[in-house]
Amino acid sequence: KILTAYRAQGGPTGRLGVPVADPKCGLVDKGCVQRFSRGTVYSSKAHVRASVTTVTGAEGEVVAAARSHVGYRKKYAKQSVQHTKFNTWMGSTGAWCSFYQSWASAAAGRGSTIPKIAKFSTFRDTVTSRMKTGSKPKVGALVFFNTYPPAGVATHVGLVTAVKPGKITVIDGNTLGNLPAGTRGVLARTWPASRALYYAY
């Protein structure tokens, strides 16, 4: 799947450049990830096609894994009790926005670079104590938002995949967006950068 995606991007003279490492396989979902000089490709048993990003390095691995599930959605009967694949992976039926970011880190072979923690407030506090934080958006950074009261308190997390003047593109899980009622999923959307509370790098 990685080879097919790489060829579709033009091979060594194409968008991704040349391979800089062998594929790293045996990951979550029987996944593999491979770095190239100008991007990263991730594949898994769960998907017909590999996902591609022009983000490089360790950040590229996590972004490529996260991109693989954009469009994933799951209906729920009760908002506080969720039964997604990411809930199953975490072993919790709670809100799963942070579970998704932890899963992407593990799926990319980055271990607990983004820690695997079942309670959002503990996840948030652990991330901000372990990682450098700031107000400047960067590709590959976690971005924290406030989505419900009290104002100014981080209640949701996403992954920054692109930065443009005044805007950030984010992949996040356990989100509503343009989805049917009673459904939450994984979406990639562009937001005003002013929506972010802070970033963790």
Image (tube, rainbow, N blue to C red):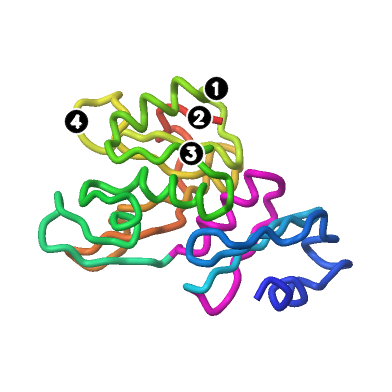
Q: Which residue is at a point 70% across and 59% down the rendered structure image?
A: 34
Seen as rendered, the residue at the extreme right is 13
Q: Which residue is at a point 78% across and 54% down the rendered structure image?
A: 38
Q: CA distance from mark 4 to mark 3?
A: 25 Å
Comes first in the chain, label 1 or label 3: 3
Q: Report the residue marked by disc 2.
A: 200
Residue type at the position of mark 2: Ala
Residue type at the position of mark 4: Pro
Name the disc covering residue 132, or none. Answer: 1
Q: CA distance from mark 3 to mark 2?
A: 10 Å
Q: CA distance from mark 2 to mark 1?
A: 6 Å
| Magenta span | 47-70
> Vertical placement of 167 versus 104: above or below?
above
* Residue 33 placement (x, y as % from top left): 64, 60
Q: Report the residue marked by disc 4.
A: 149
Q: CA distance from mark 4 to mark 1?
A: 25 Å
